[in-house]
Amino acid sequence: MLYVSDLSVSIGTRADFTDIVSSVSFEIGKGEILGLVGESGCGKSMTSLAVMGLLPEGGPWVRTGRAELAGFDVIHLPPYRRVESGHGGIAMIFQEPMSSLNPVMKIGEQIEEAIRVHERLSGDALTRKARELLELVRIPDAALQLGAYPHQLSGGMRQRVMIAIALACRPQVLIADEPTTALDVTVQTQILSLLRELCDSMGLAILFITHDLGVVAQLVDRVAVMYAGRIVETAAVAQMFERPAHPYTEALMSCLPDPARFSRRLTTIPGQAAKPGQVKQGCEFAPRCRQAVEICVADAVPYAQLSHDHRALCRFPLVEPRP
Amino acid sequence: MGSYALHRTASAVATLAAASVVIFFFMHLVPGDPLYVLLGDTATPDQVDALRAKFGLDQPIVVQYFRWLANVARGDFGTSIFFQAPVARVIRDGAETSILLASITMIWITLIGVPVGVIAAMRHGSWLDQSLSGVAMLLASIPTFWVGLYLILVFAAWLGWLPSSGYPSIFEQGGLANLHYLLLPSLTLAAPNAALILRLTRASMLDVAREDYVRTARAKGIRPMRVIFRHILRNALLAVVSAFGFTFAALISEAVVTETVFALPGIGQLVVQSILRRDYPVIQGIILVTVVLYLVVNLLVDLSYRFLDPRVELQ
Amino acid sequence: MSGGLRSQLVPFARRPIASLGLVVLVCIVAAAVLAPLIAPYDPSRIEPIARLQPPNAAHWFGTDQFGRDIFSRVVYGSRLALLIGVGVVSFALITGVPAGVLSALFPRFGRVMMRVIDVLMAFPALLLALSLIVILGRGVSNAILAIGVVYLTTTSRITYGLALRLRTETYVEAANSMGAGAVWTIRKHILPNLISPLLVQASFVFAFAQLSAASLDFLGLGAPPEIPSWGNMLAEGRIFITRAPWLLFFPGLSIAITAFSLNLVGDALRDRVDPRFREMLSGNRR
C-alpha cells in the first residue's frame, strides 16, 4: 500500500542542511497497522507530515526519498495536488482534536467539505453521506450532531469526527499522529478499537504514531522505533516486546514498569535523547548504549536484516539473524 | 442570544449613565459661573433669572442632574450661545455632513484595508508584502491634516480637479452631485485607518494560518484558495470586526481635524469653533451625542460577535 | 523573564529598518538637546525682508511669513515634541501602571477602577483631550495632561490584562503558596515581566502623542504661538499653502518621521515580547 523509502527531511539550505529525519524507510500493507514509536523530538511527526505532504512553507523540506502509494510517488505533492492527480489516498488525523477543527464551521459542513473534494455529491445525498460517516465512527444522534459546532462536543467525539473526515477522503492509508494522547484513558480505548475495526473492515493501512508503548501493545501489528531521526528497529510487535534487537529498543522495554516486580526502582536510560543532527558521526545512540565500542562511534551504522520482517540499525544486534 | 446580550447591554447602559454624570459636570468644571457659561457674557439679568429657574440652579446638584437628564431625554440640549438656537438643531444641521463623511470613509477603509491586508498575508515575506506593510506603517504615522493639506494643494490648487473646501448639501441639487466635495476629505480620513485595518487583517490572517484546523483543511485536499477564504479569512475577520468599534472612535476624533482642514460644515468643525467661541452648550451637546453613538456602535459590534463566533455564549 | 535595557536592543540586530528608526530617534534627541548649537538662527527672530523664501543656501528650509528661518524652528520644535512625548508617556505610565497592577491584584478595587476606565474610554480620544482643554485652558502642560489622560486609559487596561495573566501564572501561584506577600509578588514577578510589553506600549504612546499634540496645536488649542512647535507651524502656514508649500512640508515631515520611527521601534520591540502578551499590545487609540 504505502512504501516509504529513504525519506530525509531537512532544515537549512540545500548547501548547508541538517537532517531532522534521516533515511527513513518502511512499508505498510493492506489491513495492517504499523506503529511509529519514539520519544518526543525524535522526528515521528515530521515523518508523518512529510508523507502527508503537509510540511509548512518555508520550514523543513524533503531532501530525498519517496512515498509511494500504489506505485506512484506523492512525496513532493501537497494534498490537493494529489487529489487532482488521482492519488489522494492518504488521510491524516492529528493529536489535538479541539484545535484541529474549524471553530466557526458546523461539523456537518466540515465533513461535507471533505466529501466534496473526493466525490461528486451535493444536496441531500451529501448530507446523507456525512451522516453515514458519523454513524460509521459511532457518534450517537448523528443527524443532530451534523449541526453542532466543535466546542459543543467532547474530546472523544471530536476525534471521532476527525476520523470521519479522514474517511470521507476515501483513503487507502490513514496516518494517525498521536490521536489519543490528549484523551482520557477510557476514551482512548474506544478510539483504538474503532480504528482496529475500520482497519479490519475496510482494509485500511494505518500508520499509528505514538510514544505510548501501552497503546502499541494494544493496537499495533508491527512497530518501527525511531531515535534521533532514524528508524533503529522494525519488528512485529510481539518480537519487539519479547526479544528486541536494538539496544535502544531493549532499553525502552526495560523502562516499562513491571507489575510483577512492583517494588523495584524504575529503570531509566542514562543521558538525554539525542536530537536529530546532534551526533555527527557514527551511531546516534552510542553515547548512551551499554554495549557501544569505538567502531560504533567512528563509522556509519549498517542495517542488520535479522529475518524477513525484522531489521535493526545496529552493528551488534541483540538477536541472531535467522534465514 | 439571551444572557450575553443582556449582560452586555446592561454594561453599556451603566457606562453611559456614568458618562452622563461626567458630561453633566462638564458645565460646572468649566471656569466661570455656570449661568454665564450657558448664556454668555452678554446675558441680561432677566435672562439669568429665567435660566436659574429653568435649571433649578438653586436646587441640590443631584436634582439638577436629573433635570438635565430629563431635558436631554426630551431632546432639549440647551441653547447655543452663538447661534441663539436650540443646540439639538445646530447639531442636527452639522450631522448630515459628518455622517456622510464617516460613511464614505468607512467604505474606503473596508474596501482598501481588508483586501490589501489579505493580499499581503498571502504573499507573506515577499517584497510586495514588505512594501505594503511599510507603506501601511507610514500612513499610520503621518498626521492626517498634513496629508489633507497637500492633497488640496495637488488636486485642488494645481490640478483643479476637485474643490478644496466646503460642502454644499447634496439635498440642494438633488442626487449625488456634490459628493465629490467629500472625496478628498474622506480619502484623507481613510488613509491612516485603512492602514491600521490592513495591518490588523494581515496579522490576523498570519496568526490563523498557523492554527491546527488550517492544517486539517489542507489535509483534506481542499484547494489553496478555498482554504484561504473559507478557513483562514473567515476566522481572521473576527479580530478585524472587533476593531471596527475602535476605528469608529478614531474616525470621530480625526474628523474634527479633517473637517477643519477642508472647511466642511460638519460636527467636527462645529466642536472646534464652539470651543474657540466658548459656546459651551454646543460642546456639551456634541460630547453627549458622540459618546452615545460610540457606545451604541461598540455594543452593536460586540453583539454581532455572537453571530460571527459560535463559541461566544456567555462572558 | 525579560532582561534589562541591554537585551531590548537584540531585535534591532537583524532588522535594518528598525535600526534606522532607532538612529532617527537618536538624531531627534540630539537635535533637541543641541538645538542652540545646530540652529543657525534664533527661531523667533523676525526678518520681514526675508519672508516667504523657498529653501536656499542661507535658509535651508526656507522662511515663513515673518521671515523666520524654518530650519531653526524645526530644530527647536523637536524640543517640544520630545517634551510632549516624555510628558505624556510618563503620565500614562505613572498613573496607568499602578492602576492596572493594583486592579489585577485586588479584584474589588479592580472592578471599580476598570469601570472608571471604561467611562473614560467612552469618549473618543481627541474629544476627551479637547474636553479637558476646555476645562483646563490651553498650554503645553495642559496639553500633556489632556493627552496623558487619554493614554492612561489604554495603558491601565493593558497593564491590567498583563498583570491578570501573570497573576495566574503557575510560578506566581507557587510563590504565593510559599507565603509571598503582595508587594513581593509585584516586585519580583509582575513588574519585571511588564518591562518588555510596557516598553512597546511606551513607544506607541510616544508616537500617538506626537500626532495628538500636533492636532491640538493645529486647532490652536495646544502650545501657544510663541513656542516653536511643528503643529503650530502647520497651523500658521496653512493659508500660504499655494504660495509657499515648503512652509508645511518640513514641520509635517518631522512629525511623520518621528511618529514613524517610534512605530518602527515599537514594532521591533513587540516581536521580542512573549507571544501571549503580544496580542494585547496591538490595539491603540489615536
Image (cartoon, coloured by chain):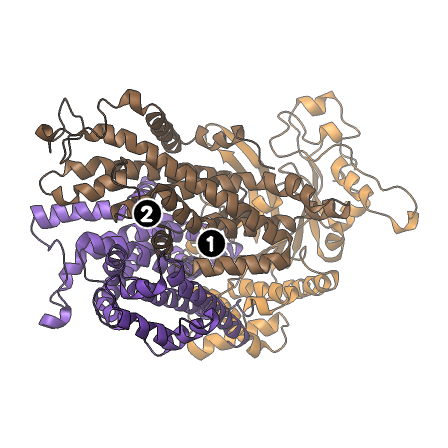
Residue A71 appears in the figure: no
Q: Which chain is orange?
A: A
Q: In the image, what residue type sits under mark 2?
A: Arg
Q: Which chain is purple?
A: B
Q: Which chain is brown?
A: C
According to the image, label 2 marks what residue? C138
Q: Secondary structure at mark 1?
A: helix
According to the image, label 1 marks what residue? B208
- Parent chain of label 2: C
Q: Secondary structure at mark 2?
A: loop
**Where is residue A311, by image quadrant?**
top right
- Parent chain of label 1: B
The relative height of residue C98 versus residue B173 in the rendered view (above or below) is: above
The relative height of residue B278 versus residue A24 in the rendered view (above or below) is: below
Q: Is residue C241 left or right of residue C268?
A: left
Camera-side residue of B12 and C175:
B12
Looking at the image, the residue that sits furthest to the front is B45
